[in-house]
Image (cartoon, helix red, strand yellow):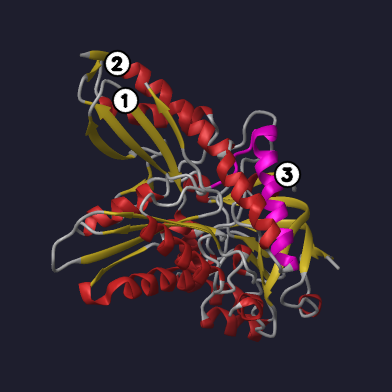
Amino acid sequence: MTRKIVIPQEEAEARLLQAGETVLLSGMIYTARDAAHRRMQEALQSGQELPIPIKGQAIYYTGPGPASPGRIIGAAGPTTSGRMDVYTPPLLAKGLRIMIGKGMRSPEVVESMKKYGAVYLAAIGGAGALLAERILDAEVVAYPELGPEAILRLWVEDFPAIVVIDCDGNNWYEIGRAKYRR
Amino acid sequence: MRKLTAAQVEDTVARLCIEANYQLHPEVQQALADSLQREEAPLGREILRRIQENIILAPKTGIPLCQDTGQTVVFIELGQEAQIVEGDLTEAINAGVRRGYQRGYLRCSMVEGLYTRQNTGDNTPAIIHYEIVPGDQLKLVVVPKGAGSENMSALRMLNPSDGIEGIQQFVVEVVDRAGANPCPPVVVGVGIGGTMEKAALLAKKALLRPLNQPNSEREIATLEKAILDQINNLGIGPQGLGGRVSALAVLIETFPTHMACLPVAVNLNCHCARHKEAVL
């Protein structure tokens, strides 16, 4: 059955999630992709605070389109997560609990996820309209100059996703695929 | 000489940019519907159903199919008896992209400056391929091409001795390695022959062919089918989460090449395989 989860998440809650299960997310999530990650890395390296609270939070790898009149946000599907891999372990060390994106992660990211208790979820790539409909509010909270790469705070309700890598490092891209490979 | 104005070109490009990003081609929709019949994985089936839901929602809600509205690739076939007047053709195409992306509320993704990677703010410049053809018409095809699938594309200069088997192996290897990243089920465009850039362009052009239309040469059509079957046995499945449907189609385009060459380019497209065309 589809599990409903609320963000922010405690480590103990996140550890219950298992690779391969479908979930519906509700609560607050932050968007960040390539340029925002680079900025956050620069902030950490120069001893500055991150522009968003990160402990127990979720980052959604997306660069939404502009909102048309009367809409909260444009299309808002996931981007390829692997490009964020090099920036991710320090964020996990700071308590990042959930990452939402699509595509494979590096062994280094998976190791950090196991160490700090984080999960990686996939949203359906190319379902930008469907996912935008589950976003109730959106506000730019950091790096507005980055345009579509700015960090937004989104309120989501029943946002559909699939647990791909759980806190134990089980990886559904590998498990699911092995079942049907011949 | 038949005269066409730059303004006509601009208007058409703007319209095609918007249509391509909101309405998926009926033949792609059909291929997705057919694939649902073949998918065995429960999760894969659920994903395919949500993808179909998205296709219905986009035009109804006024939200594009995907936030990655791509680099705008434009194929131009200009009849040699047609003349563009009252403006510059390239300028007109870029003006059309600028207008289409603004009026269509489409995300602008183009960045410039090797060191700065600044967003150009209007999704220009378009990637334009010109061809001069017989006749007095102008054909325009607009292809919004997302980065998820473009980044997983590849080209290899094979040896002629690698043969058909080598080609087959390389194409399957590219899709296998791409896994979940290019938003499967993917469309696989393959260009074989010519020089390096010719093969790459053929692969991109192959993506424009209707998914249910095999190559007109029987042997090549057989190869397309063989590669598709092999890909669908990789287990990748919808979104890479396991299943039978990893690709919707394999489309091969060929060209003569040097006796010492066998270039093979593989251009992947996501399930949201967008393109729209018009003839002026």
Residue for badge 3: A133
Which residue is drawn at the image coordinates 56% and 46% (left, top)? Answer: B67
Query: Helix, strand or loop at disc 2?
Result: strand
* Three-letter amino acid code at the position of disc 1: Leu
Residue B127: quarter of image: top left
Vertically, is B155 above or below B19?
below
From the viewer's side, name the closer residue of B125 and B246.
Answer: B246
Q: Chain under label 3?
A: A
Image quarter in which the C terminus of chain A is found: bottom right
Mark 1 lies on a secondary structure that is strand
Report, in whole angstroms, how far the alpha carbon at label 1 lies from the one at label 3.
39 Å
Earlier in the chain: of badge 1 and badge 2, it is 2
Q: Which residue is mark 2?
A: B4
Contact flag, marks 3 and 2 (Cβ < 8 Å): no
Q: Which of the two discs, 1 and 2, sits closer to the camera?
A: 1
Q: Residues within 10 Å of mark 1 (few under 14, many from 20)?
A: many
Query: Residue B54: within the magenta?
Result: yes
Could you tell me the amino acid type at mark 2?
Answer: Leu
Q: Which residue is mark 1?
A: B138
- Residue at (25%, 13%) from the top-left corner? B2
Q: Tell me if residue A31 is in the magenta stretch.
A: no
* Range of residues picked out in magenta: B42-67
